[in-house]
Image (cartoon, grey):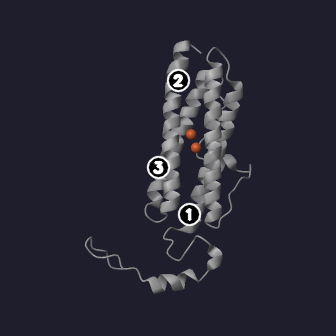
Amino acid sequence: MATMQPNQPFLADVQEIRRRARQHIEKGAVTEGYKADLETVLRLLNEALATEIVCVLRYKRHQFMATGLEAQAVAQEFAEHAAEEQSHADQIAQRITQLGGEPNFSPDGLLTRSHSEYVEGATLLDMVKEDLVAERIAIESYSEIIRYLGDNDPTSRRLMEEILAKEEEHAEDMRNLIERVGKAGL
Ligand SMILES: [Fe+2]
Ligand SMILES: [Fe+2]
Protein backbone atom coordinates (compact mmCIF):
# COMPACT_ATOMS: atom_id res chain seq x y z
CA MET A 1 0.00 0.00 0.00
CA ALA A 2 1.35 3.45 -0.91
CA THR A 3 2.11 5.85 1.91
CA MET A 4 -0.44 8.64 2.12
CA GLN A 5 0.85 12.11 1.40
CA PRO A 6 -0.31 14.81 3.82
CA ASN A 7 -2.08 16.82 1.12
CA GLN A 8 -3.78 13.87 -0.52
CA PRO A 9 -7.51 13.48 0.03
CA PHE A 10 -8.59 10.46 2.08
CA LEU A 11 -9.46 7.81 -0.47
CA ALA A 12 -10.91 4.63 0.99
CA ASP A 13 -12.33 2.03 -1.31
CA VAL A 14 -15.83 2.08 0.11
CA GLN A 15 -17.06 -0.69 -2.18
CA GLU A 16 -14.27 -2.94 -0.95
CA ILE A 17 -14.92 -2.02 2.70
CA ARG A 18 -18.62 -2.85 2.20
CA ARG A 19 -17.78 -6.18 0.58
CA ARG A 20 -15.36 -7.21 3.35
CA ALA A 21 -17.74 -6.14 6.14
CA ARG A 22 -20.19 -8.80 4.93
CA GLN A 23 -17.63 -11.55 5.32
CA HIS A 24 -17.01 -13.28 8.68
CA ILE A 25 -19.74 -11.31 10.45
CA GLU A 26 -19.41 -13.86 13.29
CA LYS A 27 -16.21 -12.02 14.24
CA GLY A 28 -18.22 -8.98 15.33
CA ALA A 29 -15.95 -6.02 16.01
CA VAL A 30 -12.87 -7.72 14.54
CA THR A 31 -12.77 -6.87 10.83
CA GLU A 32 -10.30 -7.78 8.10
CA GLY A 33 -8.74 -4.38 8.68
CA TYR A 34 -7.76 -5.37 12.24
CA LYS A 35 -4.01 -4.87 12.10
CA ALA A 36 -2.75 -6.39 15.37
CA ASP A 37 -1.87 -10.01 16.06
CA LEU A 38 -5.11 -11.01 17.76
CA GLU A 39 -3.67 -13.96 19.66
CA THR A 40 -0.90 -11.84 21.19
CA VAL A 41 -3.30 -9.01 22.04
CA LEU A 42 -5.65 -11.43 23.81
CA ARG A 43 -2.72 -12.92 25.77
CA LEU A 44 -1.48 -9.46 26.81
CA LEU A 45 -4.98 -8.34 27.81
CA ASN A 46 -5.41 -11.52 29.88
CA GLU A 47 -2.09 -10.79 31.61
CA ALA A 48 -3.31 -7.26 32.35
CA LEU A 49 -6.56 -8.76 33.67
CA ALA A 50 -4.62 -11.07 36.01
CA THR A 51 -2.50 -8.10 37.14
CA GLU A 52 -5.66 -6.17 38.04
CA ILE A 53 -7.21 -9.12 39.91
CA VAL A 54 -4.02 -9.60 41.97
CA CYS A 55 -4.07 -5.87 42.74
CA VAL A 56 -7.69 -6.09 43.91
CA LEU A 57 -6.80 -8.99 46.22
CA ARG A 58 -3.72 -7.26 47.64
CA TYR A 59 -5.51 -3.95 48.28
CA LYS A 60 -8.42 -5.83 49.91
CA ARG A 61 -6.05 -7.69 52.22
CA HIS A 62 -4.38 -4.38 53.13
CA GLN A 63 -7.72 -2.65 53.65
CA PHE A 64 -8.70 -5.12 56.35
CA MET A 65 -5.23 -5.48 57.88
CA ALA A 66 -4.48 -1.76 58.25
CA THR A 67 -3.85 -0.91 61.91
CA GLY A 68 -2.48 2.02 63.88
CA LEU A 69 -3.19 5.74 64.17
CA GLU A 70 -3.61 6.38 60.46
CA ALA A 71 -5.40 3.07 59.90
CA GLN A 72 -8.82 4.42 59.03
CA ALA A 73 -7.65 6.94 56.46
CA VAL A 74 -5.22 4.46 54.92
CA ALA A 75 -7.80 1.66 54.82
CA GLN A 76 -10.15 4.04 53.03
CA GLU A 77 -7.47 4.71 50.41
CA PHE A 78 -6.82 0.96 49.98
CA ALA A 79 -10.56 0.36 49.55
CA GLU A 80 -10.81 3.03 46.85
CA HIS A 81 -7.88 1.56 44.96
CA ALA A 82 -9.32 -1.96 45.21
CA ALA A 83 -12.58 -0.70 43.67
CA GLU A 84 -10.72 1.06 40.86
CA GLU A 85 -8.60 -2.02 40.08
CA GLN A 86 -11.84 -4.03 39.97
CA SER A 87 -13.26 -1.62 37.44
CA HIS A 88 -10.06 -1.92 35.35
CA ALA A 89 -10.44 -5.71 35.44
CA ASP A 90 -14.04 -5.38 34.23
CA GLN A 91 -13.10 -3.04 31.38
CA ILE A 92 -10.27 -5.32 30.23
CA ALA A 93 -12.51 -8.42 30.39
CA GLN A 94 -15.11 -6.62 28.31
CA ARG A 95 -12.55 -5.70 25.66
CA ILE A 96 -11.34 -9.33 25.55
CA THR A 97 -14.85 -10.59 24.78
CA GLN A 98 -15.37 -7.79 22.26
CA LEU A 99 -12.30 -9.13 20.43
CA GLY A 100 -13.82 -12.62 20.44
CA GLY A 101 -11.59 -13.96 23.24
CA GLU A 102 -12.33 -15.34 26.68
CA PRO A 103 -11.34 -13.50 29.87
CA ASN A 104 -9.32 -15.79 32.11
CA PHE A 105 -10.59 -15.53 35.69
CA SER A 106 -9.16 -18.87 36.76
CA PRO A 107 -7.32 -18.81 40.10
CA ASP A 108 -5.06 -21.47 38.59
CA GLY A 109 -1.89 -19.74 37.42
CA LEU A 110 -3.24 -16.30 38.33
CA LEU A 111 0.06 -15.19 39.87
CA THR A 112 2.02 -16.45 36.88
CA ARG A 113 -0.17 -14.54 34.43
CA SER A 114 -0.08 -11.41 36.60
CA HIS A 115 2.85 -9.03 36.28
CA SER A 116 2.35 -7.54 39.75
CA GLU A 117 2.98 -9.57 42.90
CA TYR A 118 0.87 -10.39 45.91
CA VAL A 119 2.84 -9.36 49.00
CA GLU A 120 0.96 -9.11 52.29
CA GLY A 121 3.38 -6.88 54.21
CA ALA A 122 3.89 -7.01 57.99
CA THR A 123 3.41 -3.34 58.89
CA LEU A 124 1.33 -0.55 57.44
CA LEU A 125 4.46 0.96 55.92
CA ASP A 126 5.38 -2.39 54.32
CA MET A 127 1.90 -2.65 52.84
CA VAL A 128 2.01 0.82 51.30
CA LYS A 129 5.50 0.17 49.92
CA GLU A 130 4.37 -3.10 48.35
CA ASP A 131 1.40 -1.34 46.79
CA LEU A 132 3.69 1.31 45.35
CA VAL A 133 5.96 -1.40 43.91
CA ALA A 134 2.95 -3.15 42.34
CA GLU A 135 1.75 0.11 40.79
CA ARG A 136 5.23 0.73 39.38
CA ILE A 137 5.22 -2.76 37.83
CA ALA A 138 1.79 -2.09 36.28
CA ILE A 139 3.00 1.28 34.95
CA GLU A 140 5.99 -0.31 33.22
CA SER A 141 4.18 -3.30 31.79
CA TYR A 142 1.13 -1.32 30.61
CA SER A 143 3.45 1.21 28.95
CA GLU A 144 5.04 -1.66 27.04
CA ILE A 145 1.65 -3.07 26.04
CA ILE A 146 0.64 0.40 24.79
CA ARG A 147 3.84 0.70 22.72
CA TYR A 148 3.26 -2.79 21.33
CA LEU A 149 -0.35 -2.00 20.32
CA GLY A 150 0.73 1.22 18.59
CA ASP A 151 -1.67 2.04 15.76
CA ASN A 152 -2.65 -1.59 15.25
CA ASP A 153 -5.45 -1.70 17.83
CA PRO A 154 -6.31 1.88 18.84
CA THR A 155 -9.28 0.88 21.01
CA SER A 156 -7.27 -1.51 23.20
CA ARG A 157 -4.46 1.03 23.30
CA ARG A 158 -6.79 3.83 24.43
CA LEU A 159 -8.23 1.59 27.15
CA MET A 160 -4.75 0.71 28.40
CA GLU A 161 -3.73 4.39 28.26
CA GLU A 162 -6.68 5.35 30.46
CA ILE A 163 -5.82 2.60 32.92
CA LEU A 164 -2.13 3.57 32.88
CA ALA A 165 -3.03 7.16 33.83
CA LYS A 166 -4.98 5.79 36.79
CA GLU A 167 -2.08 3.56 37.91
CA GLU A 168 0.16 6.63 37.86
CA GLU A 169 -2.29 8.40 40.16
CA HIS A 170 -2.30 5.33 42.41
CA ALA A 171 1.51 5.37 42.57
CA GLU A 172 1.46 9.03 43.54
CA ASP A 173 -1.16 8.31 46.25
CA MET A 174 1.04 5.54 47.67
CA ARG A 175 4.14 7.72 47.62
CA ASN A 176 2.27 10.40 49.57
CA LEU A 177 1.01 7.77 52.01
CA ILE A 178 4.55 6.53 52.64
CA GLU A 179 5.48 10.03 53.79
CA ARG A 180 2.41 10.32 55.98
CA VAL A 181 2.77 6.88 57.52
CA GLY A 182 6.53 7.39 57.87
CA LYS A 183 6.00 10.67 59.78
CA ALA A 184 3.48 9.04 62.06
CA GLY A 185 6.12 6.36 62.73
CA LEU A 186 3.89 3.43 61.81
FE1 LIG B 1 -5.59 -1.01 37.78
FE1 LIG C 1 -3.43 0.71 40.54
Taking 27 as reference, is 73 above or below it? above
Viewer-nearest of labels 1 and 3? 3
Where residue 94 appears, as percent x and y from the top left, is 64, 57
Local packing at callout 1 (Cα closer than 10 Å; few below 14, some 14-19, many 20+) is: few
Q: Earlier in the sequence, mark 1 or mark 3?
A: 1
Q: Amino acid at mark 1?
A: Thr
Q: Which residue is mark 2?
A: 178
Question: How far, Cα to Cα, is label 2 from label 3?
Answer: 24 Å
Q: Amino acid at mark 3?
A: Ser
Does ligand 1 reach within 8 Å of label 1's beta carbon? no
Q: Amino acid at mark 2?
A: Ile
Taking 101 as reference, is 18 above or below it? below
Q: Which residue is mark 3?
A: 143
Circles 2, 3 touching at the beta carbon (< 8 Å)? no
Q: Which residue is mark 1?
A: 40
Q: Quadrant of ligand 2?
A: top right
Name the residue at 54% across, 33% down: 132
Where residue 104 appears, as percent x and y from the top left, is 69, 56
- Depth check: 9 or 145 in front? 9
Local packing at callout 2 (Cα closer than 10 Å; few below 14, some 14-19, many 20+) is: many
